[in-house]
Image (tube, grey):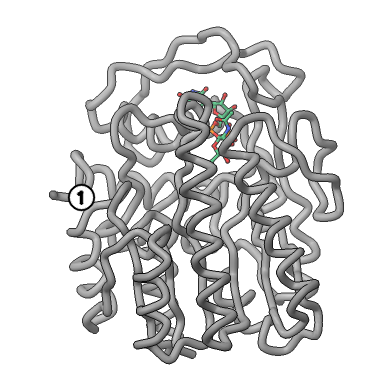
């Protein structure tokens, strides 16, 4: 297939592009580089041994999106592009709604005009809302606790409505749990700008000496050791889930399919910290801080639907995730070059 990957220079997008090329697909990347660096592209090319066909623009620009679809005979879209920082979304809600919904509108309009009916969308377990029962199953009601989360809930609804109006559409809503890890080569990984919001990149920056210590947000949750429990999934497993979903969409009659992409295993903050200490070979300092507003005690997937319907399951362990993150972070202490 000839696949348009929006946000193909981002963390999950870049790993998915490498796997798509390895699986024999033609890939066209579109990325505004709003939250990624151009040097990612050379890393992708080094891993695939092929040039990346790159379009550097913002998908909220409908005319440019329309022109791209006119030039490229696309078969499918994998839509990663979007703003993703929870705290920033509370401060700049209009930017989040405008950007995250606007990219989806441009893509849906261009797909409709050019007869492209296959779409794999980056959704998130955040759509399960404030206090979902674990393990989380796909048929739970959706809601959100911040504008970022609402953009995912809303985009899911937009896709569902579009598929009612156009039954030829085949859409996968992939609900990611907590993506971590890096390419096993150590040449691609997560490179957040500024102070990392998420746990794994923060731990990795402590390990490499960029931050003094980890702040643990609360140790009085009703969990194994009092710290928050999450379902960390290796970005390589996650990328493989996209390829499985893409293939499944070519065989299904369902207009909209929803799949959790997680391992089904919960890991606490301290368990992840200690696993990282094993990977990097030294102790990592931490201090316990108050709970972070909006955090839930436990989040982990019921991944059985994806296994049954996609034949996919996550295979990498927490130790694999820490080892690969450490390889990436120690080889690229400041992340990607400009
Ligand atoms: C967060 C977002 C979620 C988003 C996801 C993307 C919030 C409230 N939720 O989820 O909407 O989809 O990232 O990956 O921001 N922790 C620390 N110290 C840190 C950072 C995190 O103790 O410096 C703890 C958190 O309290 C939590 C766990 O580590 O228990 C994981 O946090 P994080 O990586 O931010 O992911 P989520 O909270 O699951």
Who's the residue at 42% across and 15% down the image?
A: 286
Residue 159 x/y as whole percent: 69, 64
Label 1 crowding class (10 Å Cα cut-off): few <14, some 14-19, many 20+?
Answer: many
**Label 1 element class:** loop
Looking at the image, how many numbered discs can be counted on the residues? 1
- Which of the 4 quarters of the picture holds residue 232? top right
Residue nearer the viewer, 149 or 205: 149
Of all residues shown, which one is farthest toward the front?
A: 63
Residue 158 point in image, percent of width and height = 69, 59
Q: Tell which of 118 and 304 is nearer to you.
A: 118
Horizontal relation, residue 308 to residue 191: left or right = right
Q: Taking 145 as reference, is 279 above or below it?
A: below
Q: Nearer the viewer, residue 276 or 287?
A: 287
- Asked if residue 104 shows in the view, the reply is yes
Q: Is residue 231 above or below residue 77?
A: above
Q: Quadrant of residue 304?
A: bottom right
Q: In the picture provided, is 50 more to the left or to the right than 81?
A: left
Q: Is residue 275 visible?
A: no
As drawn, 86 above or below 110: above
Residue 107 image offset from top left, x and y in percent: 51, 69
Residue under the image location 85 percent in, 47 percent down: 140
- Seen at 44% across and 30% down, the residue is 197
Give the side of residue 167 with respect to residue 186, left or right.
right
The residue pinned by badge 1 equals 336
Q: Is residue 100 above or below residue 277?
A: below
Residue 127 percent across, percent down from the top left: 70, 44
């Amino acid at each position: 297939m000839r696949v348009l990957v929006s946000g193909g220079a981002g963390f999950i997008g870049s790993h998915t592009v490498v796997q798509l090329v390895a699986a024999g697909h033609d890939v066209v990347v579109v990325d505004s580089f709003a939250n990624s660096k151009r040097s990612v592209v050379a890393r992708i090319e080094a891993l695939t041994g092929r040039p990346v066909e790159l379009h550097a623009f913002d998908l909220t620009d409908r005319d440019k999106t329309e022109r791209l679809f006119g030039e490229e005979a696309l078969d499918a879209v994998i839509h990663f592009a979007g703003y993703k920082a929870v705290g920033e979304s509370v401060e700049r809600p209009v930017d989040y709604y405008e950007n995250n919904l606007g990219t989806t509108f441009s893509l849906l309009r261009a797909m409709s005009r050019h007869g492209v009916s296959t779409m794999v969308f980056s959704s998130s377990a955040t759509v399960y809302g404030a206090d979902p029962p674990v393990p989380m199953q796909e048929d739970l009601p959706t809601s959100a606790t911040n504008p970022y989360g609402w953009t995912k809930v809303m985009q899911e609804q937009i896709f569902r409505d579009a598929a009612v109006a156009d039954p030829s559409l085949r859409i996968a809503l992939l609900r990611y749990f907590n993506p971590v890890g890096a390419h096993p080569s150590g040449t691609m990984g997560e490179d957040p700008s500024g102070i990392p919001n998420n746990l794994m990149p923060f731990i990795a920056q402590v390990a490499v000496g960029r931050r003094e210590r980890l702040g643990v947000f609360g140790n009085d949750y009703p969990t194994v050791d009092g710290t928050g429990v999450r379902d960390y999934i290796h970005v390589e497993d996650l990328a493989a889930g996209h390829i499985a979903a893409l293939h499944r969409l070519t065989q299904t009659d369902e207009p909209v399919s929803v799949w959790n992409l997680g391992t089904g295993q919960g890991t606490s903050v301290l368990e992840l910290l200690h696993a990282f200490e094993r990977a990097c070979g030294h102790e990592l300092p931490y201090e316990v801080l108050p709970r972070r507003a909006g955090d839930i005690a436990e989040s982990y997937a019921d991944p059985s639907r994806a296994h049954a319907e996609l034949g996919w399951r996550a295979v990498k362990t927490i130790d694999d995730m820490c080892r690969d993150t450490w390889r990436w972070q120690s080889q690229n202490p400041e992340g990607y070059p400009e």
